[in-house]
Image (cartoon, rainbow, N blue to C red):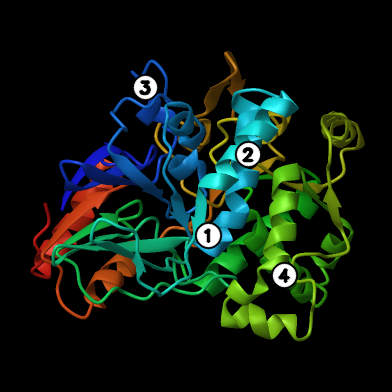
Amino acid sequence: MEVIHHGGHTGVTGSCHEVVFDSQRSMLVDCGLFQGADARGRDDESHIDFPIDHIAALVLTHVHLDHVGRIPYLIAAGFKGPIYCSPATAKLLPLMLEDALKVGVTRNKRLIERFLLDLRKHIRPIPLEEWKDVGGNVRLRFSPAGHVLGSVFVEFEHAGQRTVFSGDLGSRHQPLLKEPRSPESADLLILESTYGDRNHVGRDRRVEQLHRVLCRTLDNKGVTIIPAFSVGRTQELLYEMNAIFDLMSKDRRCSLLHNVDVIIDSPLAQRFTEIYKTLQPYWDEEAQRVLKIDDSPLVFDNLVDIENHAEHRDTIEYLKSSELPAIVIAASGMCTGGRVVNYLKEFLGDPRTDVVFVGYQAEGTTGRAIQDGDSVKIDGSDYAVRAQTHQLSGYSAHADQSDLLRFVEGMGSRPGKIRLVHGEKHAKRALSQELRKLGYDVE
């Protein structure tokens, strides 16, 4: 098997890899959008710039847009094959792409409905941990990756060779998702390296950090803005905030947080949260135990859902005029678009504002610019960054260096070769050095 990379090899977005079985048959693993610096120099970050006539199928690792965002363009280019994915991804994918089309392509309901009808004809869910014969003497198997609900790593077998794609692996500190188990073997392991150069803080430390930031919201009567992906990160934050508010009832200074609105300004996140509730069998053991005493761990008394754009604008005006403390969770996670941008425009210049990053901010994105500088350009205008910014890396959905090494070391036999993808140069370099110290062959 040969692997050709059409995206996600030299950066952290646009993941798209072609597994070549012979001159007549290939399969794609993911087909994602390029974002931030990865999109620079491209005439169209969504364009399919490689031949697809020989592409027999698309295999998905999970539903984040940097892994699935180019699917509408792939289908428009003439792709006719099946889309293999996990059962949970099969439920989440139409919702994710419907929203992406509304935001970036068209709001024409008839066109979107026509695409979604076509999309569902392609989707072929495959049960986890079972080998599936997909024709042409090719088998594949999905196993949980622990990144977001439905995320998997993928194993291909063909002509006595095994190639493994890690997809995006999750960290060990996620209460809603099961930790990934290592594959048995691989002739070639394609391994993500997003956080290949660092380790996250532990679960207790990250909860303590979030607790401290939320208490600061009370002290300065400001607005805390948390940019978060609609699927995965938002649901985990809701789960942990529910627990934090229970703990705060014992803390006199912070007990008033029970009266502070937690605003979820993302209709997509609300819809994903409802789907998460229906997929509780896929939750981790900890969350299963919580369900026995709390049947709604993603809901609490001071949670406010914002539905339409008018409510969104009214909420911003209310927060500006009332000067009451509030916590806002809104997409997008890298601040490249979505409703979080309007909150940033209004409140970044206020020193009472806190911006809490709970996920990776790719190079060239608005989120990275806010992290790194004292001003940021949004929609062509410059905004001063006087807000206090926080990076809570413990909430990242990506495995850190120790998790990635554990994934490799946990394999039944050593992989023949390892190829690092989905990482910036410094992260790849650091992870490569650690793997070579352990005697692995890293390309």
For discs 4 and 1, the disc positioned in front in the rendered view: 1
Q: CA distance from mark 4 to mark 3?
A: 41 Å
Q: Which residue is mark 4?
A: 244
Q: Find out whether the residues at labels 3 and 2 contact each other: C-beta distance under 8 Å.
A: no
Q: Earlier in the sequence, mark 4 or mark 3?
A: 3
Q: Nearer the viewer, mark 1 or mark 2?
A: 2
Q: In this orientation, which residue lies closer to the viewer: 193 or 53? A: 53
Front disc: 4 or 3? 3
Circle 2 — which element?
A: helix
Residue lying at 79% horizontally and 79% vertically, measured from the top left = 294
* CA gap, disc 3 and disc 1: 27 Å
Amino acid type, residue under disc 3 in the picture = Arg
Which is closer to the viewer, label 3 or label 2? 2
Label 1 crowding class (10 Å Cα cut-off): few <14, some 14-19, many 20+?
Answer: many
Q: Residue at x 75, y 59 (%)?
A: 274
Reading the image, the residue beneath label 2 is 116
Residue 101 locus on image (x, y percent): 61, 30
Earlier in the chain: of badge 2 and badge 4, it is 2
Q: CA distance from mark 1 to mark 2?
A: 22 Å
How far apart marks 4 and 1 lie (CA) works out to 22 Å
- In primary-sequence order, the first of circles 1 and 2 is 2
Q: CA distance from mark 3 to mark 2?
A: 29 Å
Does any portion of residue 386 appear in the rendered image? no
Q: Residue at x 54, y 57 (%)?
A: 89
**Disc 3 marks which residue?**
40
Q: Secondary structure at mark 3?
A: loop
Q: Residue at x 55, y 74 (%)?
A: 204
Residue 441 lies, in percent from the top left, at: 8, 61
